[in-house]
Amino acid sequence: MLSSDWQKQIESCNRLRALAVHHKDILLKDWIVTRVFIQGLLKQLQSLRSTVSKNALLGFKDMIETLKGKFDNELDYILPNVMKKATDTNVFLSRTAESVLLSIANN
């Protein structure tokens, strides 16, 4: 996730998304690993490449929807960043961030 190559960043986000959806037990078992993933997604969220930022947002959405209420302790770190993206002038990002915010509210 820390690569400067944006294609590798997208690929690593996709792998995390697959992990969250298909192997949530790994994330639930070890919160240290989960926090490392969250920190990586937060870093990718700040990317100047909108596709990387959007993929990070989708990663958060997948984790929130999969882990449900177990993700609440992490919202202090995530919520301000997602809210910032929801106000982005790039509609591509703001709509995705809005969907993440809805997932937070619903889960």
Image (spheres, rainbow, N blue to C red):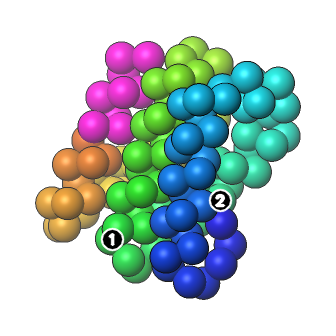
Q: Nearer the viewer, residue 16 or 81?
A: 16
Mark 2 packing: few (<14 Cα in 10 Å), some, or many (20+)?
Answer: some
Q: Nearer the viewer, residue 10 or 74?
A: 10
Badge 1 is on which residue? 50
Magenta stretch: includes residue 102: yes
Residue 23's spot in the image, x, y percent? 66, 29
Magenta stretch: includes residue 54: no
Q: Is residue 82 above or below residue 52?
A: above
Mark 1 packing: few (<14 Cα in 10 Å), some, or many (20+)?
Answer: some
Residue type at mark 2 is: Gly
Q: Main secondary structure of the magenta part?
A: helix
- Taking the image as shown, residue 52 lies to the left or right of residue 75, namely left
Q: Are marks 2 and 1 in contact (CB under 8 Å)?
A: no
Where the C terminus falls, by quadrant? top left
Secondary element under disc 2, as helix, strand or loop, is helix
Query: What segment is highlighted magenta in the picture?
Result: 99-107
Residue 13's spot in the image, x, y percent? 54, 56
Does any portion of residue 75 appear in the rendered image?
no
The numbered disc on residue 40 is: 2
Residue 39's spot in the image, x, y percent? 67, 55
The Cα–Cα distance between marks 2 and 1, rounded to whole angstroms, is 16 Å
Name the residue rendered at 55%, 41% in the picture: 18
What is the residue that sits farthest to the bottom in this orientation?
A: 4
- Taking the image as shown, residue 44 lies to the left or right of residue 58, namely right
Could you say which quadrant of the image residue 91 lies in? bottom left
